[in-house]
Amino acid sequence: MAKTTEFLMTIHNPIASILEQVPAIVLDGAMGTELERRGADLNDPLWSAKMLLDSPELIEQVHYDYFLAGADVAVTASYQSSLEGFARLGVKPSQAEALIISSVELACRARDRFWAAPKNREDRFIPLVAASIGSYGAFLADGSEFSGDYGLTLTQLTDFHRPRLELLASSPADLIAFETIPSKLEGQAVVRLLEEFPQTAAWISFSCRNESQVCHGEPFTECVAMADTCDQIVAVGLNCTAPRFVESLLQSGLGHTKKPLVAYPNSGEIWDSASHSWLSEPDAIRFGRAARLWYESGARLIGGCCRTTPEDIAAISDALRPFPD
């Protein structure tokens, strides 16, 4: 059944509003690995969300530094947070809910502090805050967001994601970021769940294992086309994917969606969940030069994921500003 114009008007699309003014939006970079680079101990199933308990001021400072580097969007430190994950640490549900909401509040505080300085407003628009919801594999903390081999049904995945979306949809965040989705099935769960929150806008980004497939094996183009059917999804693309695959993935996705494409790859290193370490070497990449290629390949939201830094985001920002014609 076609949605009415009245229904569609209830969805506030901050991405479209900004892209009416500028050709591209700069996203931030890694949160978890950046916290580790600054001395945080994230050897915990909650990963970066552990710092919501231990050191929230460090999270706020990372957000602030990404804004200084040129990021137009802060993605919150809620990627690996969940009521179940906090319960493992003995955190009561009410406190866990408050911690998840605090991830948005920290990003908003960093934005307000950044925007309060007149020099930071020059040739900028006020940054957005995207509330992160990681894949089911992120909750498992076993690396399965890079396989999608959960053995769960569509209904089970929908039920798992519902509590966080319910919390974050009512938070001060400007939109939701469903991140590192490894399979078409989990993408379908996101689409189904969003229907329960008709005023909520979101982007969805898939983790990909090569230049044509998401991590579970489905064609990236099928996942993009599936997301294109959902009016509440305001951008679609990839994250936590090796940079060497991004250009081909974007070019293939262009013909399967009318939505802006999003790309924020990792450094190209591989996470080994057994040893809790990064394997291999990063891709030989200059993020500034790559950002221009990704823009030319169709990306309109561009940033970084694991093992990227404020310096990488500054390179992307410098490459895209002044914005391409």
Image (cartoon, rainbow, N blue to C red):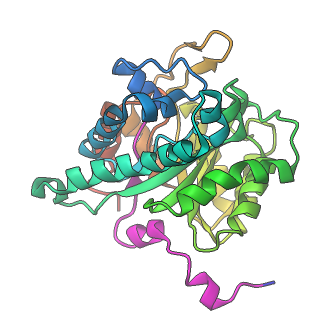
Q: Relative to residue 181, is residue 171 depicted above or below?
A: below
Q: Quadrant of the C terminus?
A: bottom left
**Does residue 22 show up magenta in the picture?**
yes
**Does residue 258 show up magenta in the picture?**
no
Nearest the camera: 64 or 299? 64
Kindly tell me whether residue 148 is visible in this rendering.
yes
| Residue at the extreme left of the image, as rendered | 118
Q: Residue, x 60% and y 29% (percent of image)?
A: 90
Asked whether, in this view, residue 123 is left or right of residue 40, the answer is left
Nearest the camera: 256 or 2? 2
Q: Residue, x 36% and y 17% (percent of image)?
A: 39
Measured as percent of width and height from the top left, residue 45 is found at 61, 25
Q: Quadrant of residue 190?
A: bottom right
Asked whether, in this view, residue 11 is left or right of residue 152, the answer is left
Q: Which residues are magenta?
A: 2-29
| Residue at the extreme top of the image, as rendered | 275
Measured as percent of width and height from the top left, residue 54 is found at 41, 28
Asked whether, in this view, residue 276 is left or right of residue 100, the answer is right
Q: Quadrant of the N terminus?
A: bottom right
Kindly tell me whether residue 292 is visible in this rendering.
no
Q: Residue, x 57% and y 39% (percent of image)?
A: 81
